[in-house]
Image: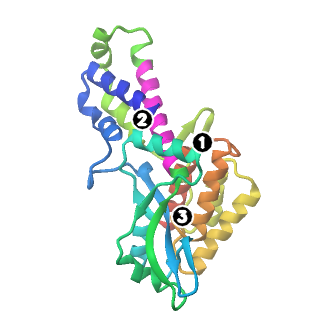
């Protein structure tokens, strides 16, 4: 379990005299405070759902249209940062695996009903509304944390060896830049992502270069039909005046499908790497910082 691995990492950091590096571990264990710097891998997408009714019928749970909203409003509704503790995330994922309708939601205030009603047919009212969280991306947080802990552990093992007594740890790591080692493993650096024998240059594509975008994502192992769908999704979003992203639009729909395929081991790497590469490639394509 990630919580146990995080606790061991925290103890290790104190043992080698680097307790100042443990803030990331603490936030993962306890959750991130509002307004604090939250890692990009904890940004997840959501869909707007609601209970709607007219004089003749009602639907207790249906996806609500949001294209009539402003870009900033859509972004606020379809993208959020997950501040939950790692234990809460693990519990939510276990619940979702055992019961598919067990999901995380973010309730919306009643005043949103009037705003969302504008996208519905006349006479249809929004009784209540909420954001339904993408559980695949929530599970991806666990993969990301596990990957970062493993990277740091392997890097540190190369320095101190396997059987070093605890009292000698601090002395052995004194000659290396542990801060840089930890930051690289946990927060990442550069544009190259290495998994096993595979190396993905995730942001080599350029702005408005659709061929470069498809090639960058193609390194993940997706077959041509899936890459063709990506090309069409991006072009449809641009034709509609939307910036292609992983949150909404046709590109957002393609991204969700891509993560599902990664979860089924259809491609040659995991959900965490797939998500990172696609996000970075799309940002390079749109010129987003």
The label shown at residue 185 is 2
Local SS, label 2? helix
Residue 146 forms part of the magenta stretch:
yes
Residue 206's quadrant in the figure?
Answer: bottom right
**Residue ID at (65%, 59%):** 214
Relative to 192, residue 171 above or below: above
Residue 54 forms part of the magenta stretch:
no
**Near-viewer residue (7 or 185):** 7
Q: Whole-percent x and y of residue 26?
A: 30, 36
Disc 3 residue crowd, few under 14, some 14–19, many 20+, Cα 10 Å: many
The answer to whether mark 3 and mark 1 are in CB contact below 8 A is no
Relative to 201, residue 213 above or below: below
Q: Earlier in the sequence, mark 2 or mark 1?
A: 2
Q: Whole-percent x and y of residue 101?
A: 57, 54
For disc 3, the marked residue is 285
For disc 1, the marked residue is 270
The C terminus lies in quadrant = bottom left
Disc 1 residue crowd, few under 14, some 14–19, many 20+, Cα 10 Å: many
**Residue ID at (67%, 53%):** 218
| Alpha-carbon span between mark 3 and mark 2 | 26 Å
**Residue ID at (36%, 42%):** 85
The answer to whether mark 3 and mark 2 are in CB contact below 8 A is no
**Near-viewer residue (163 or 58):** 58
**What range of the chain is rendered magenta?**
138-157
Q: Earlier in the sequence, mark 3 or mark 1?
A: 1
**Residue ID at (39%, 52%):** 82
Relative to 229, residue 154 above or below: above
User: In this rendering, which labeled residue sits more in front, label 3 or label 1?
Assistant: 1
């Amino acid at each position: 379990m990630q919580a146990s691995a995080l606790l061991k990492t925290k103890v290790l950091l104190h043992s080698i005299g680097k307790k100042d590096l443990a803030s990331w571990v603490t936030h993962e264990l306890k959750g991130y405070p509002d307004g604090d710097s939250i890692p990009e891998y904890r940004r997840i997408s959501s869909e707007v759902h609601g209970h709607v009714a007219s004089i003749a019928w009602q639907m207790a749970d249906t996806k609500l249209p949001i294209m009539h909203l402003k870009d900033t409003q859509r972004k606020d509704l379809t993208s959020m940062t997950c501040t939950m503790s790692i234990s809460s995330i693990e519990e939510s994922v276990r619940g979702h695996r055992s019961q598919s309708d067990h999901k995380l939601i973010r309730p919306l205030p009643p005043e949103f009903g009037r705003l969302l009603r504008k996208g519905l047919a006349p006479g249809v009212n929004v009784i209540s509304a909420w954001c339904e969280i993408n559980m695949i991306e929530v599970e991806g947080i666990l993969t990301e944390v596990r990957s970062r802990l493993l990277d740091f552990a392997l890097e540190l093992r190369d320095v101190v060896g396997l059987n070093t007594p605890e009292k000698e740890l601090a002395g052995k790591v004194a000659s290396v830049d542990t801060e840089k080692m930890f930051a690289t493993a946990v927060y990442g650096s550069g544009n190259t992502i290495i998994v096993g024998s595979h190396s993905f240059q995730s942001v080599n594509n350029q702005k408005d270069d659709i061929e470069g975008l498809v090639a960058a994502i193609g390194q993940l192992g997706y077959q041509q039909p899936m890459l063709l769908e990506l090309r069409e999704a991006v072009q449809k979003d641009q034709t509609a005046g939307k910036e292609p992203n992983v949150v909404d639009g046709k590109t957002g729909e393609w991204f969700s499908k891509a993560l599902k395929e990664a979860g089924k081991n259809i491609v040659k790497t995991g959900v965490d790497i797939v998500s990172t590469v696609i996000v970075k490639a799309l940002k390079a394509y749109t010129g987003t910082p």
